[in-house]
Amino acid sequence: MASTVIGAGITIEGEVTSDEDVVVQGTVRGKLVAKDAVSIEHGGAVEADISGGPVAVAGTVTGNINSTDRVDLQNGAKVIGNVDMDV
Amino acid sequence: MATSTVIGRASFIRGRVSGDGDLEIAGRVEGDIAVGGEVVIDTSGLIAANISASRIVVRGAVKGDLVAGEALVIEAGARVVGDLRAPRIAIAPGGLVRGHVQTGTAGAARPRAAAAPARAVVPEVKARPVVAPPPPRAALPAVKAAPPPPPPPVKTVAAPAPKVAPKPAVVAARPGPPAPVVQKKRG
């Protein structure tokens, strides 16, 4: 179960920090930091640097992705930025 | 369609949350919240933000103003420091509120709107001739005139005077406070 969900239609401008999973179906601009899994679902858009555990992208990411685990780019994913792994 | 949004208890958002849809907050938010749907602040929620939504339910802690288009519910155990405004407001026994509470729609806006035009109608140019005619009397009537409107006698006197003494009028107008005097005579 995702503990934090940014629903479709919702926009967050600023910084999102979470010790839990984060699911983005809406829009996040700024910064996204999670200690656990991050999922950008289809229709979700992140214009921010992402750092987290496993990152799954099915939406759009403009920014760098930094993961301590793995990064999955799924069908329909669009990523403009660097992908880094700190394992 | 707008899916509901959940800010988990271990999540922290600093910035602005906006858009359409419902919002459930169990974590912390600092900044600004403006959504079209319902906002629910859970018991673990900690908010330092102004919130505007169609419906707001508070069970946690909020520091900021709450404005709801439909209804605002402060439940038992909730803590709110800030003003509440909504057509309907419920504060349950045990809910803590420190701030102004206002029901109804846009009540605050009306008095301000009414006051603004009154002040705005102050053409200084025309004011001078009217004030000018009675140079000695002008000072006293001007001060007293402010609260009540005693314009009729002043105007009658003023009408003939301007031709007689245009220069003194200017001199008198400068020292005194022109804005308040002008208002009375006009109104």
Image: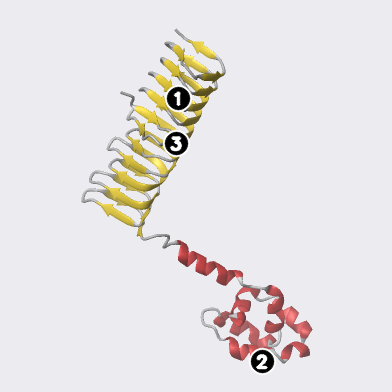
Q: CA distance from mark 2 to mark 1?
A: 79 Å
The type of residue carrying mark 1 is His
Callout 3: few (<14), some (14-19), or many (20+) C-alpha neighbours within 10 Å? many
Callout 2: few (<14), some (14-19), or many (20+) C-alpha neighbours within 10 Å? few
Looking at the rendered structure, whether the residues under marks 3 and 2 are on a common chain is answered as no
Q: Name the quadrant containing residue B27.
A: top left
Callout 1: few (<14), some (14-19), or many (20+) C-alpha neighbours within 10 Å? some
Label 3 marks a residue whose chain is A
Q: What is the x, y in percent for residue A41?
A: 43, 24
Q: CA distance from mark 3 to mark 1?
A: 13 Å
Left or right: B146, with B81 as reference point: right
- Looking at the image, which residue is at 65% across and 92% down? B156
Callout 3 touching callout 1 (CB < 8 Å): no
Residue that mark 3 sits on? A9
The type of residue carrying mark 3 is Gly
In this view of the protein, can residue A18 be seen by the observer? no
- Looking at the image, which residue is at 45% across and 36% down? A9
Q: Secondary structure at mark 1?
A: loop
Please tell me whether residue A23 is drawn above or below residue B94 in the rendered image.
above
Residue that mark 2 sits on? B157
Which of label 3 and label 2 is nearer to you?
3
In this view of the protein, can residue B75 be seen by the observer? yes
Q: What is the x, y in percent for residue B18?
A: 46, 40
Left or right: A6, with B124 as reference point: left
Q: Identify the mark at residue A42; answer none if there is no mark.
A: 1
Q: How many numbered callouts?
A: 3
